[in-house]
Amino acid sequence: MLGQRVLRVIRSWTAAGAVAVSLMAAAGVSTIFAADPNGEIDVQVNMARILRLPSAASTVVIGNPAIADATIQDPETIVLTGKTFGQTNLIALDSVGNPIADLVVEVVNQQDNIVLVYNGTQRNTISCTPECSPALMMGDDVDYLGEVAGSKTIVEEASK
């Protein structure tokens, strides 16, 4: 009885999702632009985000590859990865060089549970999810990064 109710709910949600996608396709709106019509997209630092394009891309250009990276997963799917905080742009071109997408990419703080600790000009990052522990983040103090990476290696070796 409960299983049949769950199946009905799943079918209704699947049907609703299919209708929404069909309406977007009929309106000529792609997932990437439906999320932000201004051509801006946020990605978290050290995280990836999937972008769907309205047509096939053969070239993707990132304005500042130190801030973000983009990889063509398939002709209509780009994987965007935030590398460090900042803003850059992404341009996708079709096989003859026509622009498909021209987006401003904002790489933002990873999560609300990240704590930045400053000691003068040196910064250390701590992740509190829910327990607090050191995290590796671009821009942290080099000595701190070495200590965190070193302790991670010791733990990994001990678990083998």
Image (cartoon, grey):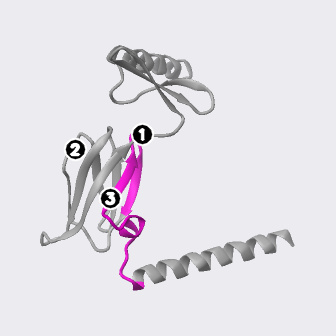
Q: Which residue is mark 3?
A: 40
Residue at left offset 44%, top offset 19%: 148
Q: Which numbered disc, 2 or 3, marks the residue that appears first in the sequence?
A: 3
Q: Which residues are magenta?
A: 26-51
For marks 2 and 1, give the CA distance.
18 Å
Residue sitting farthest toward the left: 96
Q: Residues within 10 Å of mark 2 (few under 14, many from 20)?
A: some
Q: Which residue is mark 2?
A: 65
Q: Quadrant of residue 129?
A: top right
- CB atoms at circles 2 and 1 under 8 Å apart? no
- CB atoms at circles 2 and 3 under 8 Å apart? no
Q: Quadrant of the C terminus?
A: top right
Residue type highlighted by circle 3: Glu
Q: Secondary structure at mark 3?
A: strand
Residue type highlighted by circle 2: Pro
Nearer to us in this view, 51 or 95: 51
Residue 44's spot in the image, x, y percent? 41, 45
Residue at left offset 61%, top offset 80%: 15
Residue 45 magenta: yes
For marks 1 and 3, give the CA distance.
16 Å
Q: Quadrant of the N terminus?
A: bottom right
Which numbered disc covers residue 109?
A: 1
Q: How many marks?
A: 3
Specify whether 99 is left or right of 4.
left
For marks 2 and 3, give the CA distance.
17 Å
